[in-house]
Image (tube, helix red, strand yellow):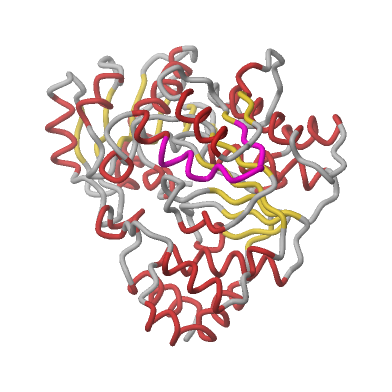
Amino acid sequence: MTYQQTLDWMFAQLPMFQREGKTAFKKDLTNILAFSKQLDFPEKKFKSIHIAGTNGKGSTSHMLASILQEAGYKVGLYTSPHLKNFTERIRINGIEIPKNKVTSFIAKHKVFLENQKLSFFEMTVGLAFDYFANEKVDIAIIEVGLGGRLDSTNIITPVVSVITNIGLDHTQFLGETLPEIAFEKAGIIKNNIPVIIGEEQSEVKSVFLEKAKKCNAAISFASDDLQEYTSDLLGDYQKSNTKTVVAALKQLKGFSISQKNITDGLLHVVKNTSLKGRWQILQENPKVICDTAHNTEGLKIVLNQLKKESYKRLHFVLGVVSDKKLEDVLPIFPQDAIYYFSKPAIPRGLSEAILQEKSAKFNLFGKKYLSVRKAYKEALLNANQGDIIYVGGSTFVVAEII
């Protein structure tokens, strides 16, 4: 199979959660454990840091990778979803996995994958772990896909575990309350492995303390750090992520990381890891900002930051996925903006007509467009110098315009 045929085959095996939604979610580790055995347990051949959380786990993962690269280490980075190319999910020192490695890996294990009925995410995790082991990385930063306890990545025994924060997202899988969601994410806490909690939240603190005690895991809360750190990632929400990163590095034994490595790593995240879509300014006059924030907690921070900007008019290119609770998200958007409603080009995308109709109930008005690109093009035509265009609502909206 060619690279494109290989990807098409992977996407077709069992639905991919990010595209399809609930039908693709599998609640156990049987498949990934079987695949790990087939691959001769690659996850045991490299050190790792495991990162879960509702918001900020992607940024936190990239910051950690950037700092460790500045310190001279060979660093694997596994994240999801991808914005443009599948290979973004698996990198070493910022370089994406070569396409031929993807093709040869799938070809080699195709019979097993078909017989075992592995999902897209499970085979991707196996591919990443196998690649990191073969390339002999010094350490790999592994971002959880969804939840924690039953996520395919949770077969690793990391040297440090990180949980950034807890918010109400993916409630149909993880639970309807913050403590229920925290329980799922606390599933990455391992025996005798230190854990960093990014934000101390009274509703869920006891869940983490209890699990850490049960696992004899040293626990610390990064939000206790009063120091401010500077990063090239410009979102206000990065303030807590930088503290989480520094706290995690303090628990990392056997690695030599200087203060200069931390400073430089935080300032060169984009250059070192090619991270995109985090308060990314695409152009000036009119200023275009895109951000992958997609749940109430993430969007509140981003919309607050928008308020600090000076502009004549605000334009929103907005799209969401169909499982988003709009009654929670839409009330936080400004009513004095012009909206361009669109549907992300994935099966899970919410129709632009439904989004327009639901938004009107919250006094958010604008036209609907058949694609994100058309909506964005129209916003660029309508916006004047001194205006701001914000593109977001979903990772998949941002993916279509960067």
194 in magenta: yes
Position of 117 with respect to 107 (left or right) is left
386 or 184, nearer to the observer: 184
Q: Residue at x 42, y 53 (%)?
A: 150
Q: Quadrant of residue 258?
A: top right
Q: Residue at x 59, y 56 (%)?
A: 156
Q: Quadrant of residue 327?
A: top left
82 or 150, nearer to the observer: 150
Position of 218 with respect to 389 (left or right) is right
Figure check: 10 above or below 332? below
Position of 94 with respect to 179 (left or right) is right
106 or 97, nearer to the observer: 106
The picture places residue 361, in percent across and down from the top left corner, at 12, 23
The picture places residue 67, in percent across and down from the top left corner, at 76, 40
Magenta region? 183-196
Q: Residue at x 54, y 52 (%)?
A: 79
Q: Residue at x 27, y 44 (%)?
A: 321
The picture places residue 15, in percent across and down from the top left corner, at 31, 65
Q: Quadrant of residue 332?
A: top left
81 in magenta: no
Position of 288 with respect to 250 (left or right) is left
Q: How many marks?
A: 0
Asked if one can make out residue 129 in the rendered structure from this viewpoint, the answer is yes
Asked if one can make out residue 282 in the rendered structure from this viewpoint, the answer is no
The picture places residue 199, in percent across and down from the top left corner, at 54, 23
